[in-house]
Image (tube, rainbow, N blue to C red):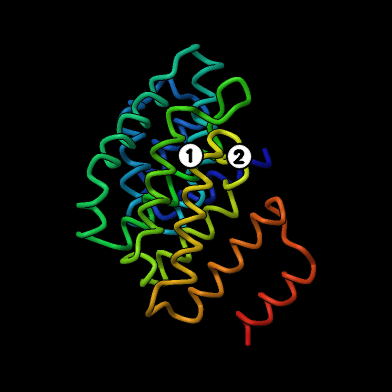
Amino acid sequence: MGETGKEEYKIQSFDSETQKLLKTALKDPSNVDLEKVANIIVDQSLKDSVFSKEAGRICYTIIQAESKQVGQSIFRRSLLNRLQQEYKEREELRTRSLQAWICYVTFICNIFDYLRVNNMPMMALVNPVYDCLFRLAQPDSLQKEEEVDCLVLQLHRIGEQLEKMNSQRMDELFSLLRDGFLLQEGLSSLSQLLLLEIIEFRAADWKMTDAAQKYYYSEVTD
């Protein structure tokens, strides 16, 4: 029960009809319109920052259930198609709503973290995820604490596995972050602290040393 119980708990923000649809998708996916389910999950992820952090687990459960039940991947295909559609319009999304853009990045990174093919992250998601993180590392994004915070959170979560998939792009990304930290004017003190912390985190092989944890935690809480 454990995991599924958590998934069901996370869908309480939906209306009762949608909750029923999602509960069925989690347990008996062949009995629902999985393309509709994928769109509902993406739509909610773009407007609900809490849900966007949890949606990967729900998607993973539906994909596993569909695979076991009917040996198909309609839901996964629908989900990836919708993610690709939003990816193509990411700049318009960011212009329209910074909150929705941050939710999208959180969601696609969450999907990258959970979805596996032969126990490996999906290659199809590697470059789109990198492109989103590169966008967050541009000078105009580094001026916004919300985007820096999102970037650092995602790198904490998936940086190590992303680097294994393409280390050259990770080197390029951190070159941008170092330049931003050292050269860019107008960064808030919190953004500077977050950038320094993630630069040191990667330098320590994606691990937080006790000394660093003590230092950054006390700085953020002071």
Residue topped by disc 2:
161
The residue that label 1 is drawn on is 111
Give the distance between the C-alpha atoms of the residues marked 1 and 2, in whole angstroms: 13 Å
| Image quadrant in which you'd find residue 65 | top right
Asked whether 220 or 194 is in front, the reply is 194
Q: Position of residue 149 (x, y in %)?
A: 48, 66
Work out whether 167 lies above or below 218.
above
Q: Which type of secondary structure does the marked residue at label 2 adopt? A: helix
Query: Which residue type carries mark 2?
Result: Gln
Q: Quadrant of the N terminus?
A: top right
Q: Residue at x 55, y 44 (%)?
A: 7
Q: Which mark is residue 131?
A: none
Q: Percent from the top left, x then y, of residue 111?
A: 48, 39
Horizontal and vertical percent position of residue 23: 47, 37
For the residue marked with disc 1, what is the amino acid?
Ile
Residue sitting at the far right: 210
x 46%, y 64%: residue: 179
Please say if 208 is above or below 29. Answer: below
Image coords of residue 96 (percent x, y): 20, 59
Q: Secondary structure at mark 1?
A: helix
Disc tally is: 2
Instruction: Kindly identify the residue that appears in the image at 64 percent across and 82 percent down.
Output: 219
